[in-house]
């Protein structure tokens, strides 16, 4: 039988392939401060150390995590300021985040909510969930609900099903989006029962958090297929991470593989300023150069938007690169993917 227990403490990581004594020491230090969790499925995809393996680096703590820079913040994207009731973040008029659970199937080392998530962080209590649902019921501008967390797919299929029943019963709610790491981190959780819970009349989108092709195993492919069969539209969300996917080839492979599996790359996030994550961040101009190198090389279907969540709660915006520049006389200068500049005429005002 396959091993099921999530690895959390240094003792759990002892005698594992590719985990060396210095990693165990880092795990011991970091686990005192942040949640650590790696599923046996993820462990099976690790082929090297956090210094050279793109999966190990996402999950095995490193001592750099204890270094916190002044610009880093426990609430890096300013969610708190936009939370009218517990569990809801309402930043854009037509959509809200509904955070039901603060636990995840695994704990990513660069997590932007690392100060909020972890074992022991409670799920919403029944009365709190009801208050959050009432908030949604009372605002007819809300068109889309984004279930996030933590990870909404750690809930039992029964519990998730009840929440989806309640959401789908709200007339103005037309779209449910689920943000989850579970399909790639713990595919065994995507059971027939869970798929049945997701199969709805209203549109259910799932944005799968994935950063590298090595995360796509035969089990993961089977899960994508099962989710498609349940009528979910699949998108991906990735984080641009130093030493993991910060090169053209790794991104090209990831986005092409996803599209070939019917998953549309949606966003490539610039890492948020979460505490102890500076070893994962590269300068924005390097991210822009990577995006420029992908333009035209991979199809529009394969290319996600490169996004920055502006610290302070100002929302997400695409951060280029920009291909167009307006000159003084109104003529535009537009760059092609080889870096050659071309003039484009101004509007004819007559
Ligand atoms: C990211 C986010 C959304 C979703 O934004 P999209 O651009 O629609 O993907 C919605 N609300 C909040 C508070 C968010 O942080
Ligand atoms: S799954 Fe998401 S919320 Fe959970 S640790 Fe990873 S990045 Fe954070």
Image (tube, rainbow, N blue to C red):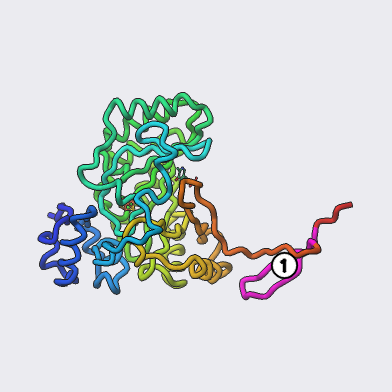
Identity of the residue drawn at 80% across and 60% down: 346
| Relative side of 176 to 52, left or right | right
Residue 180, x across and y down, in percent = 35, 48
Q: Is residue 41 left or right of residue 12?
A: right
Q: Secondary structure at mark 1?
A: strand
211 to 342, vertically: above or below:
above
Reading the image, the residue beneath label 1 is: 333
Q: Work out whether residue 120 or residue 74 is closer to the camera in this orientation and state it.
A: 74
Quarter of the rendering occupied by the N terminus: bottom left
Query: Nearest the camera: 69 or 298?
Result: 69
| Residue 169 in view of the camera | yes
Q: Nearer the viewer, residue 60 or 84?
A: 84
Q: Quadrant of residue 163?
A: top left
Q: Position of residue 338 (x, y in %)?
A: 62, 75
Q: Quadrant of residue 2?
A: bottom left
Which residue is at a point 17% across and 55% down the rendered structure image?
A: 8
Residue interval drawn in magenta:
330-346
């Amino acid at each position: 039988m396959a091993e099921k227990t999530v690895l959390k403490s240094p003792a759990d990581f002892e005698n594992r392939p590719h985990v060396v004594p210095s990693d165990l020491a880092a795990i011991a230090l970091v686990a005192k401060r942040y949640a650590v969790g790696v599923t046996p499925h993820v462990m099976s995809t690790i082929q090297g150390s956090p210094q050279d393996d793109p999966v190990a680096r996402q999950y095995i703590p490193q001592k750099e995590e204890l270094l916190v820079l002044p610009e880093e913040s426990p609430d890096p994207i300013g969610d708190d300021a936009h939370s009218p009731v517990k569990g809801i973040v309402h930043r854009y008029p037509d959509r809200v985040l509904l955070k039901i659970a603060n636990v995840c199937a695994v704990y990513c080392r660069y997590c932007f909510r690392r100060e909020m998530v972890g074992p022991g962080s409670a799920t919403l209590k029944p009365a709190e969930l009801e208050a959050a649902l009432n908030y949604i019921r009372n605002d007819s501008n809300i068109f889309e609900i984004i279930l996030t967390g933590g990870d909404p797919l750690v809930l039992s299929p029964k519990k998730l099903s009840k929440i989806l029943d309640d959401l789908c019963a709200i007339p103005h709610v037309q779209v449910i989006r689920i943000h989850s790491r579970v399909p790639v981190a713990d595919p065994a959780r995507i059971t027939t029962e869970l798929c049945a819970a997701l199969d709805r009349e209203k549109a259910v989108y799932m944005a799968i958090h994935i950063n590298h092709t090595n995360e796509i195993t035969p089990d993961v492919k089977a899960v994508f297929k099962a989710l498609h069969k349940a009528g979910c539209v699949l998108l991906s969300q990735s984080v641009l991470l130093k030493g993991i996917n910060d090169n053209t080839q790794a991104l090209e492979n990831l986005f092409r593989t996803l599209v070939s599996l019917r998953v549309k790359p949606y966003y490539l996030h610039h890492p948020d300023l979460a505490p102890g994550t500076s070893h994962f961040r590269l300068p924005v101009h390097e991210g822009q150069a990577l995006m420029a190198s992908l333009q035209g090389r991979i199809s529009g279907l394969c290319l996600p938007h490169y996004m920055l969540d502006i610290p302070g709660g100002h929302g997400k915006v695409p951060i280029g690169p920009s291909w167009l520049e307006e000159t003084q006389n109104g003529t535009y200068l537009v760059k092609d993917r080889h870096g050659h500049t071309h003039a484009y005429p101004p509007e004819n005002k007559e």
